[in-house]
Amino acid sequence: MPAAGTSSLAIPGQAAEVQISYQLPPPKPASKPDTKITKAKIRKKKHRAKFSFEAIGSASRFECKLTKAKRKKNPTFWACSSPKTYKKLKRGSYTFEVRARNRQGVDPTPAKRRFTI
């Protein structure tokens, strides 16, 4: 269907004619996804952490990052999938971050969860 136009309807042999004009709204542009951590299971004694997450909106992939507190080096995001498990974690405080990606870009506000082993 075209975005706008006029249609006419006439009955043969009749003088009456109906004319309909219409304008469709422009399509909404696709937006960047949002990300949500749906479950976090921290096992301090086993030095493990497991996170489940999902995109709000369309996403083609995810990227994760685990940062240990008081480290000078800030790690980069790496491709990951849900659930994401970290094993053999050393004692300390951590921040897990996950962000969704799609054709429009990356989630500008990654989902975060702080935890301690």
Image: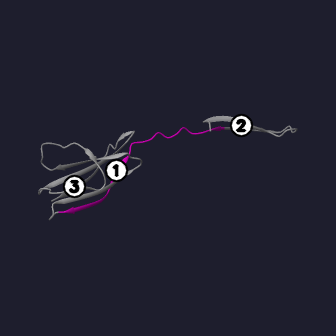
Locate residue 27, reporting x and y percent.
52, 39
Q: Which of the numbered marks, if any, corresponds to residue 35?
A: 1
For residue 3, side relative to residue 112 (left or right): right
Q: Which residue is mark 3?
A: 114
**Residue at disc 1, secondary structure:** strand
Residue plotted at (42% across, 42% down)? 31
Mark 3 or mark 1, which has the lower sequence index?
Answer: 1
Q: Is residue 99 above or below residue 48?
A: above
**Residue at disc 2, secondary structure:** strand
Report the magenta residues as a range: 22-43
Locate residue 82, reporting x and y percent.
31, 54
Residue plotted at (21% across, 59% down)? 49
For badge 1, the amino acid type reads Thr
Distance (Cα) linking label 2 and label 3: 60 Å
Q: Quadrant of the C terminus?
A: bottom left
**Residue at disc 3, secondary structure:** strand
Q: Which residue is mark 2?
A: 7
Colour mapping used in the image = one colour
For badge 3, the amino acid type reads Arg
Distance (Cα) linking label 2 and label 1: 45 Å
Residue occupying the far bottom of the picture = 45
Residue plotted at (83% across, 40% down)? 11
